[in-house]
Image: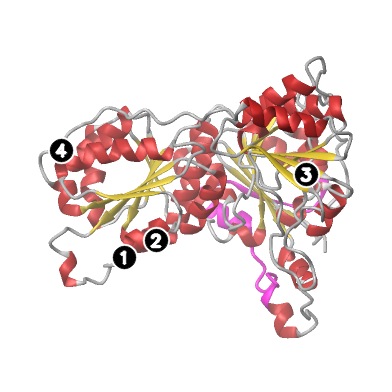
Amino acid sequence: MNGAQSLIRTLVGSGVEVCFGNPGTSEMHFVAALDSVPEMRGVLGLFEGVVTGAADGYARIAEKPAATLLHLGPGLGNGLASLHNARRAFTPIVNIVGDHATYHKQYDAPLESAIEPLAESLNGWVRRSDHTADVGADAAAAVAASMDPPGRVATLILPADISWGDGGKVVDAVPPRTAKAPADATVAAIADVLRSGEPVALLIGGSACREAGLRASSRIANATGAKVFVETFPARLERGAGLPTIERLGYLAEQVAFQLDGIKHLIVAGAKPPVSFFAYPDKPSDLVPEGAQVHTLSDNAQDVIAAVEALAGSVAADTEPTLAEPARPALPSGPLTPQNWVDVIGALLPEGAIISDEANTSGLMVPMATAGAPRHDVLTLTGGAIGQGMPVATGAAVAAPDRPVINLESDGSAMYTLSALWTQARENLNVTTVILNNNAYAILRLEMQRVGADLSGPAAKALLDLSSPEMDFAKMAEGMGVPGSRASTAEELAEQFERAINEPGPHLIDAAVPPLL
């Protein structure tokens, strides 16, 4: 058994069943070994940012890691933006990064690079396999490290000769650590804060954004009068009828200031105290109201659900949560606008949908339109590195083939990782992509205003304009094997969206929506 075979067999034995890859010469023995381990599903991505983003989406839904197969330092470098988002989402991922044979590195071949510093930038786990006999043990350690609460990116560097060498050994799975609940004294102290009579806000994140955490948080709010918010960009948020509707903390500093106005105590559970996404002239970076105290109920490495349930048991033992009633907006009519396209989605969203949301400025009203829709999950842009939407939707569809995946995608962001459509067609994934096509980097127009920069000049305007030449996403989708259509009215979007979610396989709708700003 060679090193690659022992690696894949150990990964499978540790629960890793999917490998998203874009291999090169140094990874060929891993590729060959896939035929000897049919339990491992190999999924090809045409760009490493799609590969790593798909692994992120897969793990957010499957709640276990996928592997990636990346080609040397440049391959890892191409995948770093999506891995940055995965790091911020605390997503478990096992990167397998091929390297030159150990004896070849001394020659400084063109693709030679320092892989470890790239991997270490993700603040995760990094190891290089130095002996074929150790590859299996290294793989088992990588999987366990990726699952270490709350989840992280683990990177195993595999030199080519260690991969093809004989003497590989399969190793049993290493049980990951389990998250622990916060101390009783911590819960009791924060319960006292909620009973103090002073204005309190509770900010939840991580696993608390799932049903159990949402219900407990709603009970706390109902019993104590505390405001409750979900972190701005949750990795996975459960929503819809039958669940509490909890407002997300705003993206803009002004929104957060309004939401937290008057708060004297901020309790965080699985989230960090809010800070401004960027620095702005003459505006604070720390968004906790001046004079307010921050109290940590649970950090992300702890059992966040156990924490909020314990707090609810203390202050809201006899209180029920407030649950969203089934409700849908009426189907709109007329030309598409930033306000009405979301009502089409809310009116037609299927049961059990997974929304990969990178609609950005065009999607500000999506939460209101879908609050009473059938239960669904929302996967958001945790790290702010755009281009996540299509790859994350791809991975989510691999993880949950029986659930419809809806990708709400901005036009500018879509161009970063458009080749994900090819993978969706190749794997016949049930993904419906709606491109919000406003021919602009609208979010950057907003940011230009907020930083006080002058947008009036022709050069500045041109650098944020996507209309010359105008992009035809329907044709681009068809060129990669995905049926494409274009909608400019609410009626057209409704007809095309309903058809797409009722037909198997991927679809793309190019929705012409004017800029909100």
Task: Measuring from the top left, give residue 504's x and y in whole percent.
Answer: 57, 33
Question: Residue shown at 44%/36% (left/top)?
Answer: 147
State the extent of the magenta-drawn residues as a range. Answer: 463-492
Disc 4 residue type? Gly
Residue 351 appearing in the image: no
Helix, strand or loop under label 1: loop
Mark 4 falls on what kind of element?
A: loop
Q: Earlier in the sequence, mark 4 or mark 1?
A: 1
Q: Earlier in the sequence, mark 1 or mark 3?
A: 1
Q: CA distance from mark 4 to mark 2?
A: 27 Å
Depth check, front residue: 210 or 79: 210
Residue behind mark 2:
118
Residue 35 seen by the camera: yes
Badges 2 and 1: C-beta atoms under 8 Å apart? yes
| Crowd band around label 1 with a 10 angstrom C-alpha radius: few (<14), some (14–19), many (20+) | few
Q: Nearer the viewer, mark 2 or mark 3?
A: 2
* Rendered image quadrant of residue 72: bottom left
Looking at the image, which is closer to me, 362 or 286? 286
Residue beneath label 1, please? 114
Q: Against 326, is 105 above or below?
A: below
Instruction: Using the image, tell me which numbered label, if any, was put on residue 366.
Output: 3
